[in-house]
């Protein structure tokens, strides 16, 4: 490991050097302080002394983080904190200075990332059509085809397959439920995004939705055995269909593991939403109702997860706040928004969700 530290420091400081010592901070036992560095890169801080080719002696502290359940579960969590610290340490008077931020490679080498301004991702190019194109065709009066039913069934089956993969990390399930309520992309972030005096919802009504959501947090947080593999943002803009019912998914979000209800509501809220758009909020269109019922029937038949109907409510509130938003959907009618908020409030009041009669929640 000393050779890898030496390689990194030579790259960082632009000179050849000699490592004098590597010691875990806090260790006092003499026999451990020099040679035992196997914890390097696993959350322990190390004090490194070295000498440059010009004879200058320098000392640095190299720290990393470990996942501890307090929002540090994922690699991305820890990267976010360390990248922030590198910039923030150096803007506060009298704070110890950060010299670099970087990462450990799979073979234990150390790489600098301190000159990053923004980050990017490079993905494969996928050919196909967004699933939302099918929903728009139906909304504009197109006929419900056999292929439409096959695609809805394929999407439900896909979720059943990935949700069958379980994880026993109870703390992570609790975190995901907490994020549903308090994350800036989820319920509290959305309620804060609504403009004051919007004309279709009041601040008091939004506050009541938040309070009901907190009640659901406490109902759900003990159902930790439900933690499963998820997509995290499984909506029609993130599904690309090829020929027939073959598809590819895009833009997985907010972690690998979560609650199955998150994916189910992300897709099915759009059958409800487009079914109302087709009639301008007057009723739930029969073709979209067919796809909605079919999706649930296939999913529940495959998973036998009827407990879903007892946990789905706050996830529908989250997705309902998205589609009712004047930021995301500025051109829908006031009547339509009222129906959507009826849905949110009625669902949050329901002990068990009745998917067979979902249209009654718009009343």
Image: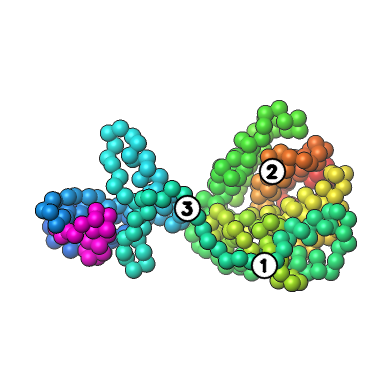
Foreground: disc 1 or disc 2: 1
* Element at label 3: loop
How many C-alpha atoms fall within 10 Å of the one at disc 3: few (<14), some, or many (≥20)?
few
Q: Is residue 216 magenta?
A: no
Residue 328 badge: 2
Residue 126 sits in which quadrant? bottom right
Residue nearer the viewer, 33 or 299: 33
* Element at label 2: loop
The answer to whether residue 296 is seen in the rendering is no
Q: Give x and y (percent) for residue 59.
A: 19, 50
Q: Is residue 269 left or right of residue 141?
A: left
The residue identified by callout 1 is 127
Q: Residue furthest top?
A: 197
The CA distance from mark 3 to mark 2 is 25 Å
Nearer-N-terminus badge (1/2): 1
Residue 119 badge: 3
Residue nearer the viewer, 50 or 309: 50
Q: Is residue 18 magenta?
A: yes
Q: Across the whole image, how many numbered discs are drawn on residues?
A: 3
Q: Give x and y (percent) for residue 291.
A: 80, 61
Question: Residue at image x 81%, y 44%?
Answer: 362
Question: Residue at image x 69%, y 54%?
Answer: 265
Q: Which residues are magenta?
A: 1-23
The CA distance from mark 1 to mark 2 is 26 Å
Residue nearer the viewer, 52 or 33: 52
Question: Residue at image x 72%, y 63%?
Answer: 129
Q: Is residue 158 left or right of residue 33?
A: right
Quadrant showing the C terminus: top right
The CA distance from mark 3 to mark 1 is 25 Å
Residue 7 badge: none
């Amino acid at each position: 490991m000393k050779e890898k530290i030496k390689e990194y420091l030579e790259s960082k400081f632009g000179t050849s050097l000699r490592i004098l010592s590597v010691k875990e901070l806090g260790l006092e036992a003499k026999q451990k302080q020099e040679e035992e560095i196997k914890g390097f890169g696993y959350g322990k801080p190390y004090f490194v002394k070295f000498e440059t080719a010009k004879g200058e002696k320098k000392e640095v502290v190299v720290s990393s983080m470990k996942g501890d359940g307090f929002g540090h579960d994922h690699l991305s969590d820890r990267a976010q904190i360390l990248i922030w610290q590198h910039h923030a340490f150096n803007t506060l008077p009298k704070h110890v200075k950060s010299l670099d931020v970087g990462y450990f490679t799979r073979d234990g080498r150390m790489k600098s990332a301190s000159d990053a301004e923004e980050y990017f991702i490079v993905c494969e190019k996928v050919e196909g059509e967004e699933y939302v194109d099918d929903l728009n065709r139906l909304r504009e009066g197109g006929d419900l085809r056999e292929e439409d039913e096959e695609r809805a069934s394929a999407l439900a089956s896909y979720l059943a397959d990935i949700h069958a993969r379980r994880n026993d990390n109870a703390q992570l399930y609790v975190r995901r439920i907490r994020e549903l309520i308090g994350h800036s992309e989820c319920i509290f972030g959305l309620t804060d995004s609504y403009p004051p005096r919007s004309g279709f919802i009041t601040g008091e009504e939004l506050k009541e939705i938040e309070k009901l959501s907190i009640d659901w947090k406490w109902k759900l947080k003990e159902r930790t055995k439900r933690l499963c593999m998820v997509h995290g943002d499984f909506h029609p803009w993130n599904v690309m269909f090829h020929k027939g019912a073959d598809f590819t998914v895009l833009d997985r979000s907010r972690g690998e593991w979560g609650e199955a209800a998150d994916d189910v509501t992300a897709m099915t809220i759009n059958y409800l939403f487009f079914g109302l758009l087709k009639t301008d909020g007057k009723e739930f269109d029969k073709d979209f109702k067919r796809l909605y019922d079919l999706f649930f029937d296939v999913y529940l038949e495959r998973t036998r997860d009827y407990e879903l109907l007892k946990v789905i409510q706050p996830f529908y509130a989250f997705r309902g706040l998205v589609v009712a938003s004047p930021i995301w959907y500025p051109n829908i009618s006031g009547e339509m928004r009222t129906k959507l908020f009826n849905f949110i409030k009625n669902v949050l009041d329901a002990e068990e969700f009745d998917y067979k009669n979902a249209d009654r929640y718009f009343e």
